[in-house]
């Protein structure tokens, strides 16, 4: 089983705080965390990050041709602006879960709308790293049979 993790603009620059972890951790810690989670569940993870909308659309389309089983996407700022990413997710028909590390609804008012949510089977907001793990578990249980 192969899952593609897509992260949008600036996620690679983010520094996070996680419950039970002292100090700040970075994007590489997120990738390490997800790699371990996936290994434990028998999933082969592929990780991709870009700051460019068209590149994110290209990787979503590529996932279709490479027969990826599921997508977990944190579109970051493109959540609120990208009809192109929405359309790409709808076009490929791959089960997708939207994830946001922070509670985007509690931030600026313009972040309350997501163009991505309607193209996804589920959304996890504000769970930190655990949101990605929840997404993997949901997709494996409901959409991907061993």
Image (cartoon, grey):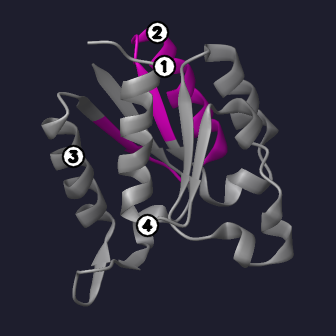
Q: In this view, does 108 lie to the left or right of 56?
A: right
Foreground residue among 115 and 88: 115
The x and y percentages for residue 55 are 56, 37
Query: Neighbour class for label 2 at 10 Å: few (<14), some, many (≥20)?
Result: few
* Range of residues picked out in magenta: 46-72
Q: Mark 1 points at which residue?
A: 62
Query: Neighbour class for label 4 at 10 Å: few (<14), some, many (≥20)?
Result: some
Earlier in the chain: of badge 4 and badge 3, it is 3
Earlier in the chain: of badge 2 and badge 4, it is 2
Distance CA(mark 2)–CA(mark 3): 25 Å
Marks 1/2 in contact by CB < 8 Å: the verdict is: yes
Front: mark 4 or 1 = 4
Residue 145 magenta-highlighted:
no
Secondary structure at badge 2 equals helix
What's the mark number on residue 37?
A: 3
Q: Name the residue under label 4.
A: 128
Q: Mark 2 points at which residue?
A: 65
Distance CA(mark 1)–CA(mark 3): 24 Å
Query: Neighbour class for label 1 at 10 Å: few (<14), some, many (≥20)?
Result: few
Distance CA(mark 2)–CA(mark 4): 30 Å
Residue 69 in view here = yes
Residue 53 magenta-highlighted:
yes
Marks 4/3 in contact by CB < 8 Å: the verdict is: no
Residue at 71% x, 52% y: name it: 79
């Amino acid at each position: 089983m192969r899952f593609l993790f897509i992260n949008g603009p600036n996620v690679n620059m983010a520094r996070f705080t996680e419950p039970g972890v002292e100090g700040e951790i970075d994007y590489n810690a997120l990738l390490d965390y997800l790699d371990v989670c996936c290994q434990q569940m028998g999933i082969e993870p592929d990780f991709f990050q870009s700051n460019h909308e068209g590149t994110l659309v290209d990787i979503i389309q590529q996932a279709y041709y490479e027969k990826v089983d599921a997508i977990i996407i944190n579109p970051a700022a493109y959540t609120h602006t990208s009809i192109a990413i929405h359309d790409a997710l709808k076009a490929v028909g791959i089960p997708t879960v939207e994830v946001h590390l922070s509670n985007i609804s509690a931030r600026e008012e313009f972040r309350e709308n997501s163009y991505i949510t309607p193209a996804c089977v589920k959304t996890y907001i504000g769970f930190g790293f655990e949101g990605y793990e929840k997404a993997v578990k949901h997709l494996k249980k409901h959409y991907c049979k061993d």
